[in-house]
Image (tube, rainbow, N blue to C red):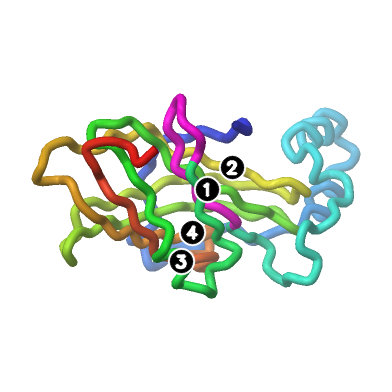
Amino acid sequence: MAEAEDKPTVEDEHEDDPNYKPPAQKSVKEIVEADQEDESLRKYKESLLGGAIKEVKAPFPDDPRNVIVSKLSLVVEGRTDKELDLTEIGDLSKLKEKVFTIKEGAKYRMKVSFYVQREIVSGLRYEQKTSRKGIQVDKSKFMVGSYGPKETAHEYLTPVDEAPSGMLVRGSYTVESKFTDDDRNSILEWKWKFEIKKDWDD
């Protein structure tokens, strides 16, 4: 399994502030070219931006989007990741057909894979609302962070969660997921399902 960033859940202090304005967005070129005379700052930016300092070939050159969410994975230690391809988000029937199974009491994490194609993106957030039989039973928000362009996918792992146990909680759940940036732009919204069972399907 590829290494992924692991960051805790955070509360968004600006979420309910109608006057909040995110800092002005700067291109990678603008950031690199600023303060060139400061050697220590230049080296710091190189270490911070990594591969973004160099010209990065866009993984999806015909796609105008800067951030492309490509995959959602169910991660359980000792088991093969179960994946949902989000590049086919237009075909909702495929999302309904593939339901994640989670064994009651099992510890698991969700992994979001995404590409940043051209410019640095700030304040990425991932949130999900879980419902059962039309009633919301859980809501989670995660600060994913800021990322620069890269030819390979970035990955974000949610903190470890534990599935509930018992006959009453077994069954099907619907999740509404949303990926946004610091400007509160919706990058991708999608619905998916998981089912809590007494044991794994395989």
Question: Residue, x 72% and y 36% (percent of image)?
Answer: 48
In the picture of the structure, the residue carrying the numbered disc 2 is 155
Instruction: Tell me whether the residue at label 2 lies in contact with that at label 4, contact meaning CB atoms closer than 8 angstroms.
Output: no
Q: Tag on residue 179?
A: 4
Instruction: Identify which residue, 63 or 37, lies in the foreground.
Output: 63
Name the residue at 33% across, 58% down. 175
In the figure, is residue 10 to the left or right of 172?
right
Tell me if label 3 and label 4 are in contact, CB under 8 Å. yes
Counting residues from the N terminus, which is met first, the one under dot 2 or under dot 4? 2
Q: Mark 2 or mark 1: which comes first in sequence? A: 1
Sooner in the amino-acid sequence: mark 3 or mark 2 = 2
| Of callouts 4 and 1, the N-terminal one | 1
Question: Circle 3 is placed at which residue position?
Answer: 189
Considering every residue shown, the one lying at the far top of the view is 78
Q: Nearer the viewer, residue 81 or 38?
A: 81
Q: Nearer the viewer, mark 4 or mark 1?
A: 1
| Quadrant of image for the N terminus | top right
- Circle 4: element type: strand
**Residue plotted at (24% across, 55% down):** 172
The tag on residue 112 is: 1
Residue at image point 35% right, 41% down: 201
In this view, 185 is above or below 34: below
Please give the range of residues in magenta: 70-81
Instruction: Give, as a three-letter code, the residue at label 1.
Output: Val
